[in-house]
């Protein structure tokens, strides 16, 4: 027999799941301007891509997927993914849109948003990632995007409501045109304390990034000593 006090008890409302944000590292490009596979180019004793993987692993992201395409086997063998998962986009030659879509599909369905990173930005920091994730969870903004030297740039947090627009993209495009006219996008200015969003597209870009002993990467030997004259 049910007691009267229990008869009048209202059913408990299920609490909404806490927001979860997964990370997608785009690393599928053909690196044509670089002339070789830039993501394996050495920087401070690690491949370029390893820097991005390491800071993502050190961040508060719930999960991380790295989307590979061009030279996928060589890159997979050349990096240590840690808690990140490597996924392959066989359609990488069609452009960035297909790699973004592959990354979003690989994330757990429980994620409320995705933080998208580029594999050729080795000076991004876990501090910046955590800041973007925190703002995304607190504000529930449709997107939280970095602003570097006055221009919008990845990393960017994309709420799940934007994913259908991402899946409709075709070719070598990202979310810039979709986010541009929206008023519900939160911008975060990237200061020196949050890191640097310099990307590496050419050998000249690579040379501008110095190793810790201030020796140009092109002159650093595998044993860590300088071979510069």
Image (spheres, rainbow, N blue to C red):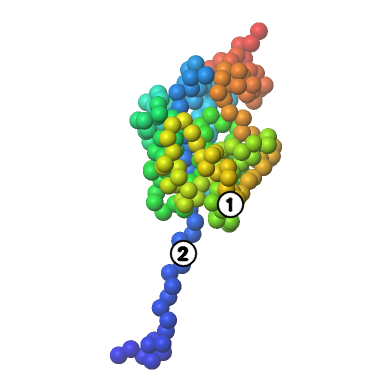
Question: Is the residue marked by circle 1 packed among few (<14), some (14-19), or many (20+) residues within 10 Å?
Answer: few
Q: Quadrant of residue 216?
A: top right
Query: CA separation, marks 2 and 1?
Result: 22 Å
Per the image, label 1 sits on a secondary structure element best described as loop
Evaluate if marks 2 and 1 touch, with contact meaning CB atoms under 8 Å apart. no
Q: Nearer the viewer, residue 6 or 27?
A: 27
Question: Is the residue marked by circle 2 packed among few (<14), some (14-19), or many (20+) residues within 10 Å?
Answer: few
* Residue at 58% over, 52% down: 184
Q: Which residue is mark 1?
A: 184
- The percent position of residue 149, horizontal first and vertical second, equals 68, 34
- The percent position of residue 4, horizontal first and vertical second, equals 38, 92
- The percent position of residue 215, horizontal first and vertical second, equals 65, 18
Give me the disc on residue 2: none
Q: Nearer the viewer, mark 2 or mark 1?
A: 1
Q: Quadrant of residue 93?
A: top left
**Above/below status of 108 relative to 149:** below
Side (left or right) of 165 relative to 146: left
* Residue at 52% over, 37% down: 117
* Residue at 68% over, 37% down: 150
Q: Which residue is mark 2?
A: 16
Furthest residue toward left = 1
Side (left or right) of 86 relative to 219: left
Q: Is residue 129 visible?
A: no
Furthest residue toward top = 229
Furthest residue toward front = 181
């Amino acid at each position: 027999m049910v007691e009267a006090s229990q008869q009048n008890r209202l059913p408990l409302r299920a609490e909404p799941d806490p927001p979860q944000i997964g990370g997608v590292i785009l690393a599928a490009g053909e690196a044509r301007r670089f002339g070789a596979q830039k993501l394996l180019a050495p920087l401070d004793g690690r491949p370029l891509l390893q820097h991005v993987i390491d800071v993502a692993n050190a961040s508060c992201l719930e999960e991380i997927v790295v989307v590979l395409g061009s030279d996928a086997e060589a890159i997979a063998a050349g990096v240590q993914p840690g808690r990140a998962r490597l996924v392959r986009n066989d359609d990488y030659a069609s452009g960035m849109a297909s790699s973004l879509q592959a990354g979003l599909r690989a994330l757990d369905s429980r994620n409320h948003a995705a933080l998208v990173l580029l594999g050729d930005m080795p000076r991004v920091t876990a501090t910046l990632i955590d800041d973007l994730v925190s703002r995304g969870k607190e504000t529930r903004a449709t997107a939280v995007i970095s602003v570097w030297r006055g221009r919008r740039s990845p990393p960017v947090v994309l709420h799940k409501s934007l994913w259908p627009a991402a899946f409709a993209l075709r070719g070598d495009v990202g979310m810039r045109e979709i986010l541009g006219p929206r008023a519900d996008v939160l911008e975060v200015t990237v200061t020196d304390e949050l890191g640097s969003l310099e990307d590496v597209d050419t050998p000249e870009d690579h040379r501008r990034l110095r190793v810790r002993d201030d020796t140009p990467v092109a002159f650093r030997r595998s044993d860590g000593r300088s071979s510069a004259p």
